[in-house]
Amino acid sequence: MPKKTRTMQSKIGFGTPEDDWIRTLIFKDFVESVLHSNKFKTCAYINAEIAMKLYSKHLTGKINISQEIWKWINLNEWLTLLK
């Protein structure tokens, strides 16, 4: 790719508001179903109790852990496919 094209400032990506999306009712129900699932609670990689506390803080807007929540969801789906 030519340097002129590669270094164009107008070609820089943009962020998405997933932190806001995860706070909507439809996502809230989905995320909570994952966090309360037996698969997630018995996962050796994540402490479900701590995850739920962090998620509660995310919902109130005290913190933004949308990337972590997305990782939890994907890990849970991946583990579900393995069994």
Image: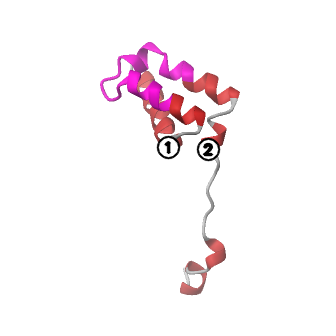
Residue situated in front as seen by the camera: 59 or 34: 59
From this viewpoint, which residue is outermost toward the left?
Answer: 44
Identify residue for label 1: 67
Q: Nearer the viewer, residue 15 or 52?
A: 52
One can see residue 1 in this view: yes
The reply to whether residue 82 is visible in this rendering is no
Residue 55 x %, y %: 51, 30
Q: Residue at x 59, y 33 (%)?
A: 60
Relative to 33, say whether 21 is above or below.
below
Q: Is residue 45 highlighted in magenta?
A: yes
Residue at x-position 59% and y-position 86% = 4
Instruction: Give the magenta range.
Output: 32-55
Q: On the image, which quarter does residue 40 sit in?
A: top left
Considering the numbered disc 1 on the image, is that residue within a helix, a strand or a loop? Answer: helix
Three-letter residue code for mark 2: Glu
The amino acid beneath tag 1 is Gln
| Residue labelled with disc 2 | 18
Residue drawn at x 30%, y 24% as measured from the top left: 44
The earlier-in-sequence mark between 2 and 1 is 2
Residue 38, horizontal then vertical, whole percent:
43, 13
